[in-house]
Amino acid sequence: MQATAQEIRQFVVDNFLFGRDGDGLGEDDSFLENGIIDSTGVLELVAFIEEKYGVSVLDHELVPENFDSLRNLGQYLDRKLGEKQAGSHAG
């Protein structure tokens, strides 16, 4: 899902880094520890993910393991999209 990863990176750079130093953002860089995204920013990121990809982020999924780096977010989104696709084939 290379396009998805690029879209997420671009959203983070545009909305939280304001276009600066996006090339310096590594896949495993912690959004919170590096001051890239605060708790309000996480909510913005969740809203983007839900709107852009048509998934619902559940309260118990709002953990750093899912939302604290580009890699974590990409893996989380891959799982959610996989569940969504599997659900559309059921029935």
Image (spheres, helix red, strand yellow):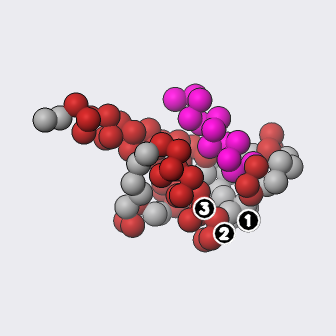
Indicate the quadrant where residue 27 lies: top right
Residue 44 is marked as: 3
- In this view, the residue farthest toward the bottom is 39
Q: Amino acid at mark 1?
A: Gly
- Graded by Cα atoms within 10 Å as few (under 14), some (14 to 19) or many (20 or more), the crowding at tag 1 reads few
> Which contiguous range is marked in magenta?
1-13
36 vs 56, nearest the viewer: 56
Residue 74 is left or right of residue 29, and the answer is left
Q: Amino acid at mark 2?
A: Asp
Q: Report how far apart the C-alphas of labels 2 and 3 lie in the structure.
A: 10 Å
Residue 38 is marked as: 2
- In this view, the residue farthest toward the top is 2
Q: Position of residue 9 (x, y in %)?
A: 67, 42
Indicate whether residue 49 is drawn in magenta: no
Tag 2 near tag 1, CB within 8 Å:
yes
Q: Main secondary structure of the magenta part?
A: helix
Q: Amino acid at mark 3?
A: Glu
57 vs 62, nearest the viewer: 57
